[in-house]
Image (cartoon, rainbow, N blue to C red):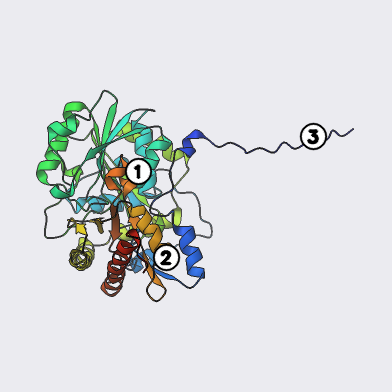
Amino acid sequence: MSIKIKKMWCIMQVSKRVLQLKDSPLRKLTPLIEAKKKEGKTFIHFNIGQPDLETPQCFFDAIQNFKGNNVPYAPSLGIPPLIEAIQGYFKHQGISFKSNEIIVTTGSSEAIFFVMNAICDPFDEVLIPEPYYVNTVSFMKQLDVVVKGIPTYASDRYHLPSMQDIETHITPRTKAMLLTHPNNPTGTVYSEYEMEMLKEIAIKHHLYLVVDEVYTGIVYDQIPSRSFASLEDLDDHVVIIDSVSKRYSSCGARIGAIASRNHNLMKEIGKLAQARLSAPTLEQIGAVALYNIAPSFIKKTAEIYECRRNVMVNALKDIEGIHVSVPEGAFYCLVDTPFHSAEAFALWCVEHFHVNHESIVVAPAQDFYSNPKSGAHQIRLAFVHDVVVLEKGLNLLKEAIKQYTFVQKGINV
């Protein structure tokens, strides 16, 4: 005998954890952009830090030379040749890591997620200078970790406040400070004084100092810069995050690394690495070749981006109503616009603005702050195009700002 069950129409529930996550401000316009492309509109993308420079050929050659007839899991902590290559990369900077002090990850995103998972319990706190890389907050929310922003300002080129100011944000639940060096989205390169100050805070308050160094070497104006791993007396505190994505234009390879001399922490992170089995095998083989590239390659890459930075900054200074803090490193400009809602401006550029069916995509910066109002008027621009495309895109931006100013006043354009 069969029993008929009447279907009850209802919405299947999802977790509260995922509901508290926001769409990425860097990618949430993608569906609309793709729809507009089908209508014949083209875009110059300033919103994503996707380098346009060629990935070094050695990456592809290494994968092509793979001789196996089966692609196996890699060791959970990373293939030995890659760990050795990462050791060599740090050695060029005068920094020594043992093989058991490095874990290979599936990109720097997984690295940050692993580190915070190993450091923090739910409702613990992490201090991050703001504005910050927005995806970091998403990782924290997935772990129920509280992000406490340390305000920095364009008038100071987004350098850190005093030690006393930073210490006002520290509570008994504070476990770590997390920063990107050079910084995304501000381009700030932390000075020797700032590094020593953070060292003192970490020791005094027993905090981890987690530093995302994926933009290492992309520094301008001959500003001195070194890895936080080179600081003395911080072996138990410092955790370095690295990746092949930015320096080697290999974002899609999804190969990153964690480096720390805190053996107890690395042991626990190793459990997380085992649980996800391994990072991609073939991409690790390719990454060996990337990490073995001579440091002169990174210097030449930085020179290309410095030229692009100069083009972008000079063009932005020529746009009425715009203010830009000159970035010292990485490849982003954080820009003050004359609009109360840069998000609305970004949407308008995609939906309505074009010159001969060509437009731009910018990243609104409100979600780069713990209080969205602080960045509501800002956009982040990535200078990841050659100079010709940059100049074209910046001319479009200038026209878009001019037209949107009229739109704001209710004047048809």
Q: Amino acid at mark 3?
A: Ile
Residue farthest along the top direction in this orientation: 172
Number of labels in the image equals: 3
User: Which secondary structure lies at badge 1?
Assistant: helix
Asked which quadrant contains residue 144, the reply is top left
| Amino acid marked by disc 1 | Thr
Of pointers 3 and 2, the one earlier in the residue sequence: 3
Counting residues from the start of the chain, the first of labels 1 and 2 encountered is 1
Q: Residues within 10 Å of mark 2 (few under 14, many from 20)?
A: few
* Along the line of sight, the residue nearer the viewer: 250 or 411: 411
| Picture residue at 11% right of the left edge, 55% below the top | 223
Mark 2 element type = loop
Q: Quadrant of residue 98?
A: top left
Left or right of residue 147: residue 218:
left
Q: Is residue 67 visible?
A: no
The answer for how far apart the CA atoms under marks 1 and 2 are is: 31 Å
Look at the numbered disc 3 and give the secondary structure of its residue. Answer: loop
Q: Nearer the viewer, residue 256 or 39?
A: 39
Q: CA distance from mark 3 to mark 2?
A: 50 Å
Relative to 307, does residue 247 appear above or below in the rendering? above
Task: Point out the frontmost of discs 1 and 2.
Answer: 2
Mark toward the start of the polypeptide (3 vs 1)? 3
Name the spot of residue 373 as percent of width and height, x first.
30, 43
Which residue position holds label 1? Answer: 136
